[in-house]
Image (cartoon, helix red, strand yellow):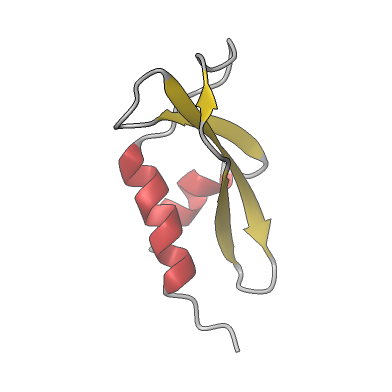
Amino acid sequence: MNDLDIKNFNKQVAQTYYITCPDRPDYYRTVYIRWNPFTESLQPMVSNAVAGSPPPGMDPISPLQLSRLQRTQMQSTFF
């Protein structure tokens, strides 16, 4: 992840977003983004699928952003 991506993602720290399930559009998952000080990276925390529609006022997160956040967790060099 480059510096520009980190600056954009830092606006999302401690925010909760939602993503609809691709196989069941009537279900959604919440995604909470937090800063992990041990790996010095952002960590998405994805909930179990919930039936219904997302609460009003909650913003969606794109599948691309979510996959990038999950990928950075796998690339960490924490020992």
Q: Quadrant of the N terminus?
A: bottom left
Residue 73 shows in this picture: yes
Q: Quadrant of residue 65?
A: top left
Name the residue: 53% across, 17% down.
54
Residue at image location 58% in from the left, 41% down from the top: 47
Q: How many marks?
A: 0
In the displayed orientation, state which residue is furthest to the bottom.
79
Residue 3 shows in the view: no
Q: Residue furthest top?
A: 56
Q: Position of residue 55 (x, y in %)?
A: 59, 14
User: In which quadrant is the C terminus drawn?
Assistant: bottom right
Residue 43, horizontal then vertical, whole percent: 57, 57
14 lies above or below 76: above
Q: Is residue 25 above or below residue 68?
A: above
Residue 37 percent across, percent down from the top left: 69, 67
29 w.r.t. 43: above or below: above
Q: Nearer the viewer, residue 56 or 21?
A: 21
Q: Nearer the viewer, residue 17 or 51?
A: 51
Residue 11 shown left or right of residue 36 in the figure: left
> In this view of the protein, which residue sits in the foreground, 23 or 57?
23
Q: Residue at x 54, y 31 (%)?
A: 17
Find residue 24 and report its image quarter: top left
Determine the residue positioned at 30% across, 32% down.
22
Query: Residue 6 placed where, x, y %?
Result: 48, 55
- State left or right for residue 55 relative to residue 9: right
